[in-house]
Amino acid sequence: MTSPSASAPARAATKRTVLMCRPEHFTVSYRINPWMHPEDPTDTSLAVRQWETLHAKYVELGFEIHLIDPIPGLPDMVYAANGGYVLDGIAYGAKFEYPERQPEGPAYMDWFRANGFDVREPVATNEGEGDMLLVGDTIYAGTGFRTDPASHDELRAIYQREVVTLKLIDPSFYHLDTAFAVLDSKGGPDSVAFLPKAFDARSLDILDERFPDAIHVNDEDAKVLGLNSFSDGRNVVIASRATDFERQLTERGYIAHGVDLSELLLGGGGVKCCTLELRS
Ligand code: ARG
């Protein structure tokens, strides 16, 4: 953990409510992104221990944490961010691109229903908060690899918010949350961090115009999924190996908390992937 630099602006934390899924059945048995190598061994108990450190960090930060039961045969279910999108107490369900993950959509919708959310069944393919991130009153929505832009129209209709489409072009950064991090969900010119090379030219113009003071991360930090982080506005939980990102966060008044999720990186996911925010 690092303390914020004395000259940086003061940052305020807002308590977060999140949904997580213990990786009891985690492994890499298929390949749907370039990070996954089914021929290489994985260590499920190590994945669980590392995930416990993320869970413990969220407890320490005072978050309200809900858990969904992991289902055997769904090794990627730990990446809860893909399980749906929740805002205004409404849960827009996920509809996964690849058959291997498709049963996760209904499983998460069942959880949302059982926990009092107003569930909207998706028509278009979308991978939940992995591709939809709220900054201020705008939803930034990714496309290019998984989420169909038709789902961006569904988002607009459901939440009555501005939805800005961002196109991803690098297969290693296939979900928006692998290339774009919300540091301060209230918004503002410096409220996000991103990896410029992950976006097409039109999307990059939008990001530069709306976030002129954003943090740009380097390739090394991007390669350990440093951007796949979760912030409460003051505390930013990141991959411990993303050291330059950590330095930039500290300079800007955030407290960076590093966690090691190396085992879950073998599936192509990190901190944010394991975290679905529940907004009432
Ligand atoms: N193996 C999973 C997949 O490819 C990883 C998902 C990562 N989740 C995320 N929100 N980026 O679908």
Image: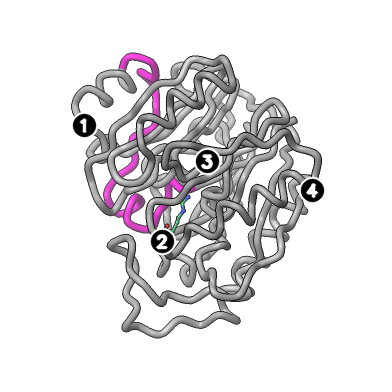
| Sooner in the amino-acid sequence: mark 4 or mark 2 | 2
| Sooner in the amino-acid sequence: mark 4 or mark 1 | 4
CA gap, disc 3 and disc 4: 20 Å
**Mark 4 C-beta closer than 8 Å to ligand 1:** no
CA gap, disc 2 and disc 3: 19 Å
Label annotation for residue 99: 2
Q: Position of residue 36 (x, y in %)?
A: 34, 69
Q: Is residue 84 magenta?
A: no
| Sooner in the amino-acid sequence: mark 3 or mark 4 | 4
The residue mark sitting in front, 2 or 1, is: 2
Residue at (58, 38) in percent of width and height? 121
Residue at numbered disc 1: 200
Relative depth, front residue between 137 and 70: 70
Relative depth, front residue between 225 and 137: 137
**For residue 40, above or below residue 279:** below
Q: Where is residue 120 in the image (x, y as percent from the top left)?
A: 62, 34
| Sooner in the amino-acid sequence: mark 2 or mark 3 | 2
Residue at numbered disc 4: 114
Q: Is residue 226 magenta?
A: yes
**Mark 3 C-beta closer than 8 Å to ligand 1:** yes
Q: Position of residue 267 (x, y in %)?
A: 42, 66
Q: What residue type is labelled 2?
A: Pro
Asked if the residue under mark 3 is in contact with the one under mark 2, i.e. CB atoms within 8 Å, the reply is no
Q: Which residue lies furthest to the left in this view?
A: 201
